[in-house]
Amino acid sequence: MIIYNVTVKVNPQVAQEWLRWMREVHIPDVMATGYFEDYKILHLVGHDDDQGITYAIQYSCKDLDTLQQYQARAAARLQQEHAERFKDHFVAFRTILEVIDNGQ
């Protein structure tokens, strides 16, 4: 299992609008690509400040090949839509995590 983690620090003035758009538009669009099995929206507790509220969106997929297909075929368009919508109101970085033990 691969976790595609997108960490985003959002300007407090647009944070509620951003979160609503993520839930109603962006994440459903990402999930509709068919590459991911599920997702989680997380809030980094204790890291909010005047410069932004930090969230992590974690998308799960079956393997690295599936993630690479998403990155090659769909990621650029979806990232561009996000960038155009929220312009200078966020910073983001992406990490890839491999689940080696899920505790079950």
Image (tube, helix red, strand yellow):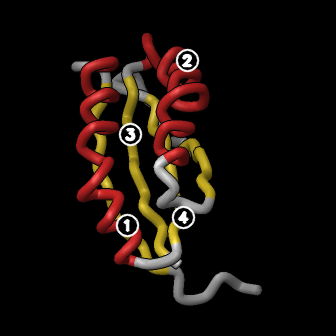
Residue at position x 47%, y 60% in the image: 35
> Which is more N-terminal, label 1 or label 3?
3
Question: With respect to residue 56, does 77 lie above or below?
Answer: above
User: Residue drawn 62% across and 57% down?
Assistant: 38
Residue annotated with mark 4: 60
**Can see residue 45?**
no
Residue at the image position 51 percent from the left and 15 percent from the top: 17
Give 76 or 21, whichever is nearer the viewer.
76
Callouts 3 and 1 close, C-beta under 8 Å: no
Mark 1 or 2, which is nearer the eye?
1
- For label 4, the SS is strand
Tally the marks.
4
The residue pinned by badge 3 equals 8
Asked if marks 1 and 2 touch (Cβ < 8 Å), the reply is no
Is disc 2 surrounded by few (<14), some (14 to 19) or many (20+) residues within 10 Å? few
In the image, 3 versus 15, the foreground residue is 3
**In screen coordinates, is 49 left or right of 46?**
left
* Sequence-earlier tag: 3 or 2: 3
Identify the residue position indicated by label 1 in the image. Answer: 67
Label 1 crowding class (10 Å Cα cut-off): few <14, some 14-19, many 20+?
Answer: many
Q: Secondary structure at mark 1?
A: helix
Q: Secondary structure at mark 2?
A: helix
Image coordinates of residue 10 in percent, x first then y, are: 39, 27
Q: Amino acid at mark 1?
A: Leu
Q: Amino acid at mark 4?
A: Ser
Disc 2 and disc 4 in contact, CB within 8 angstroms: no
Label for residue 16? 2
Seen at 59% across and 26% down, the residue is 24
Q: Residue 95 in the image: x percent, y percent?
A: 33, 62
User: Outermost residue toward the top?
Assistant: 13
Question: Which callout, 2 or 4, points to the residue nearer the camera?
Answer: 4
Q: CA distance from mark 3 to mark 1?
A: 19 Å
